[in-house]
Image (cartoon, rainbow, N blue to C red):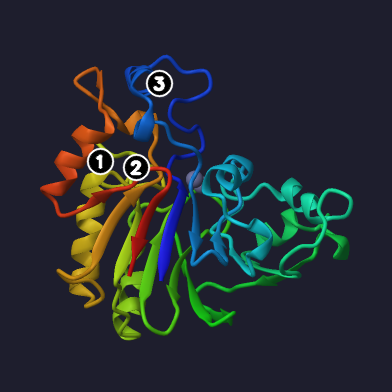
């Protein structure tokens, strides 16, 4: 399974549109991997996770054929994860000769409501998933787990292609005990975890429906106890907010964060980051 992170920031991106905080100023001055757009993942060039407001820059930068995507998993309905207006772009005359249609979209009831305005012309089919429900599409199986995030029934996903298993763990704070119990009971074993690190350096584990690095450590420990993670599990942090990238009044750059995370055996993602599992 090839996992490509097309964007690695929270809603406000880094640097944020109207912000002059130390993290945003440092990121803007340094550029490169410090500049982050909204979170989105592309799996094997044919399965997308989330569909926020940065679809277009992600399409441009990656060179991917977005019309070849067959499956779209939606974590929740926040605007950095679902921008329903972009589905109109699939219609003639805004698009011609789509590589694949209809796109199979999966998510919760709230995402379904946001897609109510879509029509057959958009070439999408929507399937509502229940919490702890499993579905399949195009050779993948995925299980929706309840996230700890302030919106209606948000999900994280366990995604498998039959060979490798990914736990896409955002947007979420530390999940409820029942989630870890479910993972243990079903005997999942993760080759990689892509995890919410919105509050990165903040001295909190669980930060309002998101995690810090401390939260990531606690999450990993709980998954290890559940038997789903071990030393062979690759741990990648993402969904960064500028608010988590300030330390002692100074903006922390990607290279410094990499050094810090290396000591915890975690990988810091950046826009365009690719992982093979
Ligand atoms: Zn988000
Ligand atoms: Zn800022
Ligand atoms: Zn969110």
Q: From the image, tell me which residue sits under label 3.
A: 28
Looking at the image, tell me whether mark 3 or mark 2 is earlier in sequence order: 3
* Residue 207 disc label: 2
Between 23 and 70, the residue placed more toward the observer is 70
Mark 3 crowdedness (10 Å alpha carbons): few <14, some 14-19, many ≥20: some
Residue 200 in the image: state x and y as whole percent.
28, 39
Q: Nearer the viewer, mark 3 or mark 2?
A: 3
Q: Which residue appears at 49% of the width and 38% of the height?
A: 37
233 over 114 or under it: above or below: below
Mark 2 crowdedness (10 Å alpha carbons): few <14, some 14-19, many ≥20: some
Contact (Cβ within 8 Å) of mark 3 with mark 1: no
Q: Work out which quarter of the rendered image holds the N terminus and state it.
A: bottom left
Q: Work out which quarter of the rendered image holds the C terminus and state it.
A: bottom left
Quadrant of residue 234 in the image? bottom left
Q: Is residue 49 visible?
A: yes
The residues bearing labels 3 and 2 have C-alpha atoms spaced at a distance of 25 Å
Residue 20 in the image: state x and y as whole percent.
42, 14
Mark 1 crowdedness (10 Å alpha carbons): few <14, some 14-19, many ≥20: some
* Residue 204 disc label: 1
Is 211 placed left or right of 96 in the picture? left
2 over 254 or under it: above or below: below
Residue 162 in the image: state x and y as whole percent.
42, 85
Contact (Cβ within 8 Å) of mark 2 with mark 1: yes
């Amino acid at each position: 399974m090839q996992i490509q992170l097309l964007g690695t920031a929270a809603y406000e991106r880094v640097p944020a549109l109207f912000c002059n905080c130390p993290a945003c100023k440092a990121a803007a001055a340094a550029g490169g991997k410090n500049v982050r757009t909204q979170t989105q993942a592309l799996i094997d060039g044919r399965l997308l996770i989330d569909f926020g407001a940065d679809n277009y820059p992600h399409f441009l930068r990656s060179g991917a054929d977005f019309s070849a995507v067959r499956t779209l998993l939606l974590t929740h309905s926040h605007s950095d994860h679902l921008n329903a207006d972009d589905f109109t772009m699939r219609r003639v005359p805004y698009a011609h000769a789509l590589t694949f249609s209809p796109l199979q979209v999966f998510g919760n009831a709230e995402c379904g409501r946001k897609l109510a305005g879509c029509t057959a012309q958009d070439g999408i089919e929507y399937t509502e998933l229940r919490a702890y429900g499993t579905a399949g599409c195009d050779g993948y199986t995925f299980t929706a787990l309840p996230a700890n995030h302030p919106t209606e029934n948000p999900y994280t996903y366990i995604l498998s292609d039959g060979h490798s298993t990914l736990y896409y763990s955002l947007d979420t704070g530390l999940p409820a005990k029942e989630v870890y119990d479910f993972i243990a009971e079903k005997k999942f074993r993760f080759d990689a975890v892509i995890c919410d690190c919105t509050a990165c350096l903040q001295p909190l584990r669980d930060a309002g429906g998101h995690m810090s690095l401390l939260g990531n450590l606690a999450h990993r420990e709980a998954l290890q106890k559940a038997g789903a993670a071990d030393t062979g599990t690759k741990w990648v942090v993402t969904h960064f907010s500028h608010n988590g990238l300030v330390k002692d009044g100074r903006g922390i750059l990607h290279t410094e964060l990499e050094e810090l995370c290396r000591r915890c055996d975690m990988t810091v993602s950046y826009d365009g980051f690719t992982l093979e599992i």
